[in-house]
Structures are given as C-alpha cells and as structure tokens.
Amino acid sequence: MSIQEHSQFIPHFWCRNRHLQTILPALFRAPAPLPYKRERLELDDGDFLDLDWIRNNSKSLVVLSHGLEGSSRSPYIPGMIASLSPLGLDFLAWNMRGCGGEPNRHLHWYHSGRSEDLRSVIQHVKPLYESIILIGFSVGGNITLKYLGEESDGITPKIKGALTFSVPLDLEDSARTMESPSCTIYMQWFLRKLKKKISQKMALYPDSLSLVGYSKLRTFADFDSRYTAPLNGFSSANAYWRASSSLSFLEKIRVPTLLISAADDPFLGKRCLPFEVLRENNFVHLEVPRNGGHVGFISRKMGHPFWLEERTLSFISDLNI
C-alpha cells in the first residue's frame, strides 16, 4: 500500500488543537437538513434498519455509515452529502440498529463490529446500481473496513472504492486511549448517550436490563463488559474487541480504499495507525495528517472548511465511475 504521513491538510490557524478540531464540528456545525426519503429494511433475524435516501436517478450510489451514537443526521453525514452533490450521485445514509429515532426490536442493538448489517444494506441496494462507494466515519469506518476484509476476493465488483475517517482499527487500543484524563469529557458524553439508549430498551425488556450502578461506569471497558459483550454473545470486553476490530481484516481488502486518521486524534492510540501492517496491501492507502482531531479536519481554506469532504470529492472523481 502507499502510506502518506502528514498529508496536504493544513488546519485553520486558530484550530490546530486536537480537541478544538474534534469538538467544534460536533457541537456547532449545522448543515441544512436534507430531504431524506426513509425506507425500513426488514432483516432476516426479525429486526430492522432505517435507511435514509437522497435519490438523483443515478446509477452510482454512495453508502454512508455513521459513528458511535450517531445517525444519518450527524453533522458530518449531511455535510458530506451536500459536498458531493455536484457529482449527481445517489446517497444512502443508513442508521445502525436503534439509531434511527426508534429503538430496534431485539434486546441487543448495534455494536462496533456488526458488519452483517452493512452486508444486508449492500445486498439490498446491489441490484439497483452499477457502482457503489462506501464511506465510513469512526465506528462506521471500522464496520466498513471489516466488511470489505470479510468479503475479500468475493466482494461484488459493483463496489468501486471506500473511504474511512478516524477509524478505531484496534478497538482495545482506542478504548484504553480514551481512559486518559484528557478524554474524560468524551467518555462522559458517550456514556450519557448510551444510558439513554438503555433506558429506552428497558421499556421493552424490563427484566433483562438494569441501570443500577450505572453512574460508576467510567470507561468503554466498564460499559462493554456490562452490556455490549454479554448482550452480543461475547465472553468479555476483550473478546468483543478482538473479534470486532477491523485491523485484522485490512490485509484482505481488495477494492481501492482510503483511510484517513489524524496523528493527533484523541480517540486513537498507536495501534490504530499500524504503518507496518498496512504496507502489504496495495489496495489500501493511508493518509495521516499531523492535525485534524477526530472527524474534524477544519481547514484554512475559505469556502470549503472541511477538508475531509474536499478529499473525498477528489478520491471519488479519480475512480471515474
């Protein structure tokens, strides 16, 4: 593969700090709402996914996967769609289980390695399009990369490329990194969001879930040990992280794939930037800007301040679909 350390991204002069890059887009970016058309995809296991569409009568589709506790309305999703709209493509922003505004039916909800749901989405849209491009943000990127590696040589030729941003390739590494005191504000935010999700689930499964002692949880290790692992059939948080991390699937990817993660991303440790591991796959290109935070990348460029969108436009244009 090609590895580009310190790419062309130049942060805005007042926004070089990694926490500002991470927090400002999440809190203060407000793209115009998109006229989504919602479709409910019924799954073979009796659950469902809510799919939000922007259709332009194109034969090419972009499938976007949001991050942890995000949705099709997370600012980076409509922002990306709006930036790519000049290409005239169709767009599908799918909501992971329980993220579309309504609790999913099963006791368990989505998790960071549930690539079978993305597989169901691809199977659903494949007959409708000649070309498909995948875009994944953070945990959505982990699911995207895991899916691509699982499919490997057997992947549908309709998938022409993939882009992923700020991906926790090694979930344990990311979880341990976020135990740092500098990440306390992020952990508290995620734990509050996840608590709300559990409260909604308790209305459906009052005998299977409890929030007793929830205030004592401080880390993803705490949360995943108590909820994610047992609800999804894993023996421990470590077992869940090992099985769900996309890092071990990267060498099997067989479509052009761009990974972008900032060297200063507060959510990612060193194992999430595995330069030596990634050198062996010519299908995968890694870019590591010095700055950018987590799904931030606010640039100094007037009129187009979010570099990820500019870089995506360039990547898709090069695919010649």
Image (spheres, rainbow, N blue to C red):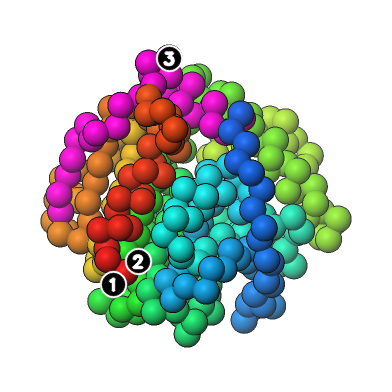
Q: Secondary structure at mark 2?
A: helix
Q: 266 or 78: which is nearer to us? A: 78
Question: Toward which corner of the image does residue 100 lie, by quadrant?
Answer: bottom right
Where residue 199 sits: x, y (%)?
80, 47
Question: Toward which corner of the image does residue 205 lie, by quadrant?
Answer: bottom right
Label 1 crowd bin: few (<14), some (14–19), many (20+), radius 10 Å: some
Disc nearer the start of the sequence (2/3): 3
Q: Which quarter shows the C terminus?
A: bottom left
Q: Which mark is residue 152?
A: 1
**Residue type (three-letter) at the residue carrying disc 3:** Trp
Where residue 244 sits: x, y (%)?
43, 57
- Magenta region: 1-27
Q: Residue at x 70, y 35 (%)?
A: 192
**Mark 1 and mark 3 in contact (Cβ < 8 Å)?**
no
Q: Which mark is residue 22?
A: none
**Mark 1 and mark 2 in contact (Cβ < 8 Å)?**
yes
Q: CA distance from mark 2 to mark 1?
A: 6 Å
Q: Which mark is residue 14?
A: 3
Q: Which mark is residue 148?
A: 2
Give the foreground label among 2 and 3: 3
**Residue type (three-letter) at the residue carrying disc 2:** Leu
Q: Is residue 152 left or right of residue 197?
A: left
Disc nearer the start of the sequence (3/1): 3
Q: Residue at x 47, y 73 (%)?
A: 58
Q: CA distance from mark 2 to mark 3?
A: 37 Å
Q: Secondary structure at mark 1?
A: helix
Where residue 71 sits: x, y (%)?
62, 51
Q: CA distance from mark 3 to mark 1?
A: 42 Å
